[in-house]
Amino acid sequence: MKKKDIITGLVVILSITALSGYLLAQVYKITKPRIDEQKKQEEQRLYKEIFPEGAEFVEEKEYVAVYDGNKNPIGRVYQIVQAGYGGPVVIKVGFDTEGKVKGVRILEQSETPGLGAKITEKTFLDQFSGKTGNELYLKKYNKEGKIDAITGATISSRAVSEGILKLQEKIKLEKTADTVTGATTKEAGYEKTD
Amino acid sequence: MKKLIEPKSFSAGLWKENPIFFLMLGLCPLLAVSSSLKDAIGMGVAFIFVLTGSNITVSIIRKVVPSHIRIPVFIVVIATFVTIADYSLAAYLPKLHRNLGVYLPLMVVNCIILGRAEAFASKNNLINSALDGLGMGIGFTLAIIIIAFLRELPGQGTLLGINILGENYKPFLIMIMPPGAFFVIGFLIALKNSIGGRKKC
């Protein structure tokens, strides 16, 4: 290969990638606000689906607090990312004030279309509503489990079930942590006055 | 020398050089996304857009690209169109975008698209390249629609998500699972060969 060929090759490929980069930046600029807007709308829609009686959804650090029309707290929506069959599955889980699952929705997933992607369907997700504790396991993994996996998509179904179980565990820990820190601050305050 | 406008470059992709049934290219997205008719149509439309766009661009730049770097240049061109399709679908048809999942970005390395850029667009003028892209794209879309039809109907009893075969129908689930795709495409190619579509060597 001659020196000249290398240089022309370099110039051509550099200018084409630069052009492509510029074009994509423009497309990105146009579509980005739309994509963000869609995502936000989608999230609000999911919250409303999980808590149909919810009037206000306030984003907190780790969860979304849900209030009814009279400003009473009626539950929280948590998010967890769990490994599925085709990639991460982003799950939104609503818990009511008693710690029972209120509803589950899938925000993002890249499971096999027509198979694992069925975890987004209500017939599967509605099984979790009202369940708590070991009932959230798939039937085949725990005697107390009450969730039917989707035929041909056990891994995807398990990802959702495991995600919810993990969140449940985390919330339990948070609750005990709250009482513990509450106790220590009290003691600290007591020491000061002493 | 080829004519400025050659109608054959459009019609070839539909049947005589159909990318699926005759060239046997691009089978991976075909097998993966054909389990529901809706996704298949979406995939087909995105495919037509990317194939036509990349064919036109490759044809325009064909004289300035030295042959030893043509493949990376083609990949950049194709990736640009795929990314445009990806962003636009995410912005305007988020539901379809979610369903297509990973197969949309995977179009970058699709062998039909790269194959047409290399075999056709890099050697033909703009109009013929655009026609070839459209023809091949429509040929692919027709094939994926036929296959999705033959999989979704027995596999789920539905078409476009609407129940056709009634509530009592027990779905023949294997049809929407990966083996179903191989069955359908195998039988279709056998059928095509038996009606005389086989190419003589």
Image: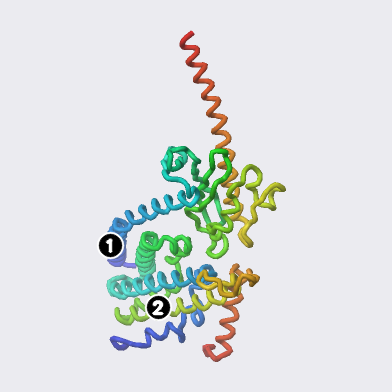
Q: Chain of mark 2?
A: B
Question: Alpha-carbon neighbours of circle 1 within 10 Å: few (<14), some, or many (≥20)?
Answer: some
Q: Which residue type does callout 1 highlight?
A: Leu
The quarter holding residue B67 reads bottom left
Residue A19, numbered label: 1
Q: Residue furthest top?
A: A194
Quadrant location, the N terminus of chain A: bottom left
Task: Provide residue A150's location: percent of width, then percent of height.
Answer: 62, 59
Q: Quadrant of residue B11?
A: bottom left
- Residue A194: numbered disc: none
The answer to whether residue B201 shows anywhere in this view is no
Q: Is residue B124 left or right of residue B18?
A: left
Q: Position of residue B161 (x, y in %)?
A: 52, 69
Q: Secondary structure at mark 1?
A: helix
Residue at x-position 46% and y-position 82%: B18
Question: Is A34 placed above or below A176 here?
Answer: below
User: In the rendered structure, are the residues bearing label 2 and label 1 in contact, judged by CB atoms less than 8 Å apart?
Assistant: no
Say the numbered circle drawn on residue B119: 2
CA–CA distance in space, label 2 to label 1: 24 Å
Residue B32 lies, in percent from the top left, at 53, 68
Residue drawn at point x = 51 percent, y = 78 percent:
B146
In the rendering, at what x and y percent does residue B196 appear?
54, 91
The kind of residue on which mark 2 rests is: Ala
- Compared across the picture, whether B148 is left or right of A45 comes to right
Identify which residue, A179 or B190, lies in the foreground. Answer: A179
